[in-house]
Amino acid sequence: MVSRRRDYALILLASVFWGTSFPGSKLTVGLVDPLFLSFARMAIGSLVGFATLAAMRRLDWRVFLSPYVWSLGILNAIGFELQNVGISLTTASKTALLVNVNVVFIAVLMAVVFRERVTSHKVLGILVGTGGVVLLATRLDPNFLAGGEFRGDLLVFLSGLVWSFYVIGAKEMVDRGGDYIALVTGILAVSALAALLPLPFIGWPVPSAPEAWLGIAYLGLVPTFVPLLLYVQSMRTISPTISALLILLEVVVASVLSFVFLQDPLSLFTIVGGALILAGAYIVTLGEKQIPGPAAGGLSPVPQDTVVPGPDGVSRR
């Protein structure tokens, strides 16, 4: 139980880091080409990872032999490319809403791939949490749908869909065990390589403004390597379905920071929407069973149909 509470804390901390990236990206993408921003952010994040591994004397290039590192790195790059281009064409609020709708896709994929039980708590929690995101992002304003361009909305929505498959692949990777720091570093390095590929075709749009590099530095150093590491570590004991709901907290963080730095309004809708998001996350955790924790030597693979004794008999998840 202690391990699980710690992993809940890791997810919540990751969501705070990621929440700062929405206003940060919106401010930076106005000064930097969105494709270059994806490359620079991933490159800086991977450098942080390599420096961490070197300091811990755990640098091992064999991590790049893992097909998960390559496939997840490419998916991550595609997701960021779509989001960064999309947010330059639409509003930050719609970006937060459309990206986080992936909680529904993750729940469906977990049920299909991992045979995870679709309980009433999960369904209710997803509905309440998603309702909170809709309320917080739209403020029930009918003009909300008119904000931004449809092309940007579609790109942001597709980024959320891509990350749904990314999350399922990350769960598969974690269940196989390994060095979390090396795996996350490898994913970010591959993401940087994948994001680098289109730059020669658009003329290497390297920014010159100091403000642009300040935004790039923040996004690369703060909401990239650390929260991804925390998120991957939390997958040891917590289902990605639960994680996706807890990460909705990033929408609340983004709204508060947008109010402080971008003068976005902070209304009753923000407070009620945030409360619904937290309520949805709490509801979905009720009735969740403990996944066996990792052994001393690393991760314990979680079978697709883990048997868990409960007060009402044996359940499977």
Image (spheres, grey):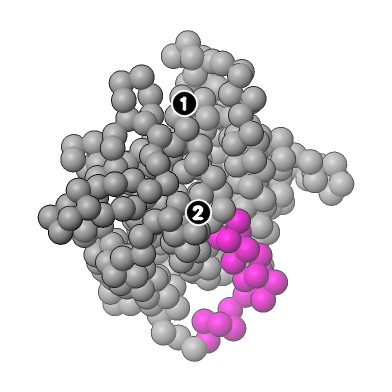
Residue 251 on image: x %, y %: 40, 61
How packed mark 1 is, by other alpha carbons closer than 10 Å (few <14, some 14-19, many 20 or more), is some
Name the outermost residue toward the left. 311
Instruction: Judge left or right: residue 44 versus residue 13.
Output: right
Depth check: give the residue in front, 11 or 3: 3
Q: Which of the two labelled residues, at mark 2 and mark 1, occupies the earlier sequence position?
A: 2
**Residue 111: image tag:** none
> Residues in magenta?
143-162
| Residue pictured at 70% horizontal, 72% vertical | 151
Measured as percent of width and height from the top left, residue 311 is found at 12, 55
Judge whether 73 appears above or below 61 on screen. below
**Residue name at image x 28 percent, y 37 percent:** 292
**Quarter of image, res 6:** top left
The image shows residue 289, relative to residue 68, as above or below, that is: below
Pointer 2: residues within 10 angstroms few (<14), some, or many (20+)? few
Toward the viewer: 234 or 248?
Answer: 234
Element type at mark 2: helix
35 relative position to 236: left or right = right
Q: Which amino acid, by three-letter code, is at mark 1?
A: Gly
Which residue is rendered at x = 45% and y = 51% of the image? 114
Q: Which residue is mark 2?
A: 113
Circles 2 and 1: CB distance less than 8 Å? no
Q: Nearer the viewer, mark 2 or mark 1?
A: 2
Q: Quadrant of the N terminus?
A: top left
Q: Which amino acid type corresponds to the residue marked 2 in the rendered image?
A: Val
Q: State the residue position of label 1.
A: 178
Q: Marks 2/1: CA distance?
A: 21 Å
- Tell which of 194 and 298 is nearer to you: 298
**In the shown orientation, is residue 67 left or right of residue 194?**
left
